[in-house]
Image (spheres, rainbow, N blue to C red):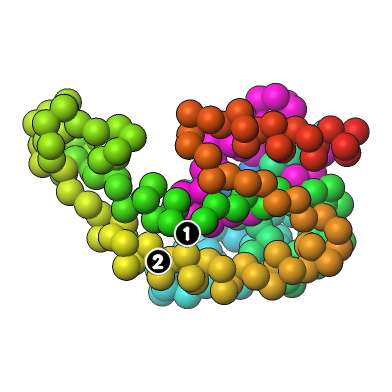
Amino acid sequence: MNIVLLGPPAVGKGTYAGFLSKKYNIPTISVGDLFRTAIKNRTELGKKIQDYVTSGNLVPDEIVIELVKNRLEEPDCKNGFLLDGFPRTVPQAEAMMEFKKIDIALNFVAPDGVIMERISGRRTCRKCGAIYHIKNIPPTIDGICDQCSGRLVQRADEKPEVVKKRLEVYREKTKPVVDYLKQKGLLADIDAHYDIKDVDKILNQCDEHLQKLN
Ligand SMILES: [Zn+2]
């Protein structure tokens, strides 16, 4: 089962991928992790990626494509994979269709309000980095870390106006890919507005789609 995962920041993709990976016994391939590993190992591609990243430029399609292609050829992907962070552009999607078949693209969707609340409710401990949520995982004392008594702060990229912008950018950037996969009949929308404790409601929708593939 070759599965592509799509969804805005904080929709919970990583969590669902973890469950699906275990259940279907296929690896999760995160392009962000591939970048980090390639840079760390100083591979030929890694050096190129580092140059783009340090200069603040987007890594070009052909480099991302080569990196993903190489990874998907490894033996652990023989029976399938969950791919997170790729394809991000239509040329990437087209290239992938050439070297690997995509069976389905699970598109996790949730209203902006839900995502805003999830992200902008987060508080991070300045001292130890522990993460809280004002509603879902509140500290015992308001604004103070349970573990180290450090002060809890809201990260700059988690402020509501910044989150709103991130969501807009995400939508604008991925819309062409979403449209492309939909056109190919590969897109399956998953309603991910549920709370994380209702993760089964989200996974059941995934299962329904994935079982049709078998
Ligand atoms: Zn702390």
- Answer with the quarter of the image where residue 161 lies: bottom left
Q: Is residue 131 shown left or right of residue 25?
A: left
- Identify the residue at horizontal 70%, vertical 67% (top origin): 177
Is the Cβ of the residue at disc 1 closer than 8 Å to that at disc 2?
yes
Locate residue 160, reporting x and y percent. Answer: 31, 62
Q: Is residue 80 shown left or right of residue 137?
A: right
In the rendered structure, which amino acid carries the disc numbered 1? Asp
Quadrant where the C terminus lies?
top right
For the question of whether residue 196 can be seen, the reply is yes
204 over 192 or under it: above or below: above
Locate residue 74, reporting x and y percent. Answer: 75, 40
Q: Is residue 77 shown left or right of residue 38?
A: right
Residue under label 1, please give it.
112
Residue reaching furthest to the right? 214
* Range covered by the magenta-colored residues: 1-28
Q: Is residue 2 magenta?
A: yes
- Answer with the quarter of the image where residue 14 lies: top right
Q: Which label belongs to residue 3?
A: none
Q: Nearer the viewer, mark 1 or mark 2?
A: 1
Residue under label 2, please give it.
164
Q: Is residue 51 shown left or right of residue 93?
A: left
CA gap between label 1 and label 2 equals 8 Å
Q: Exactly how many numbered labels are in the figure?
A: 2
SS at mark 1? helix
Chain-order first, disc 1 or disc 2: 1
77 over 176 or under it: above or below: above
